[in-house]
Amino acid sequence: MKKSTLILILFAFLLNSCADTSSQKETPKTDETPKNSFGLVIHGGAGTILKKNLTPELEAQYKETLEKAAKKGYEILNNGGTSLDAVEQTIHILENSPLFNAGKGAVFANNGKNELDASIMEGKTLNAGAVAGVTNLKNPISAARKVMENSDHVLLARKGAEEFAASQGLETVDTSYFFTEKRYNSLLKAKNKDIKDKAASIDPFIKDYKYGTVGCVALDKNGNLAAGTSTGGMTNKKWSRIGDSPIIGAGTYANNKTCAVSGTGHGEYFIRANVAYDISALMEYKGLSLQEAAKEVIQNKLKNMGGDGGIIAIDTKGNLVAEFNTAGMYRAMVDENGTVTIGIYKE
């Protein structure tokens, strides 16, 4: 073979190799080996959660409920259940507890009502459902799932959402079910005192009037991700205000290519920053790991905008993350071995 011919062949080979490399899609960075084949993370809200504001008895109640919820989700996943079932059933426990700002423990709007929001999303199909401003649904997260699975829509609001939920056979309750004295007193203080001054210093519920949500993210044994979020919104909210929790991409997002995310914090900022989706996008398009993406969005982008809060997330390899820029976030993680890790303060 002539030397000139050999050079041409080598040159063509190099061109082809470069073309193949440039056409490859960048993939999210993960650890070399999977962390967990399945797993789950939950949160119960973020804010100025300080040890001095919680009695030992109340702290124990929070930890007990978080552990109960985490173990419920683990039981479903360990038995081969879907991530959607794990998310929904786990959030039920948090919605049924008066400790958290969702369902039974929801805060009061300015009109004296409990106006509830929730959303859910599955990573396999990118299907999603949500409800906003409902007042008589015991478990709004289940209504969100019905919207996702049994309607052509993503988000239903107020009376229409309630009518749809009733048509699906979901449990409705009298509005008195949601009454808790602590939350109602917080509303009265919010109406009659300066939230940013005296009231904020004496009542942690008032100080964090912007916060309070529950959420769950899960990866099941089939490799499918799901995320869900449920909330009572903001204490003393007016004019049918809706935050990020029922907004897909803001407070909730799941994609089997990347991760599942649920957020908690000042919802207006989460909407403007598109927080949940942004974490997924950084993984998909820039190749960041879950931890890197979460830190970039929560500690840099969100904080620079003036937003407070945090997220929980799990990726396709089972890496678990809880990232927040506040003093605390009620949270729990459970891995494939059933090991539950609970946190409240910034540790």
Image: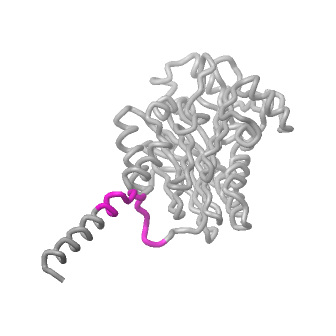
Q: Horizontal and vertical percent for residue 320?
A: 52, 59
Q: Horizontal and vertical percent for residue 214?
A: 62, 43
Above or below: residue 32 compared with residue 141: below
User: Residue 314 versus residue 91: which sits nearer the camera?
Assistant: 314
Name the residue located 71 percent from the left edge and 49 percent from the top edge.
88
Above or below: residue 26 compared with residue 159: below
Q: Is residue 71 left or right of residue 283?
A: right
Considering the whole magenta stretch, tell me its main secondary structure: loop
**Figure colour scheme:** one colour
Q: Quadrant of residue 340?
A: bottom right
Total marks drawn? 0
Q: Quadrant of the N terminus?
A: bottom left
Magenta stretch: includes residue 24: yes
Q: Residue furthest left?
A: 3
Q: Is residue 45 left or right of residue 23?
A: right
Q: Quadrant of residue 134?
A: top right
Q: Horizontal and vertical percent for residue 295?
A: 39, 49
Residue 305 appears in the picture as rendered: yes
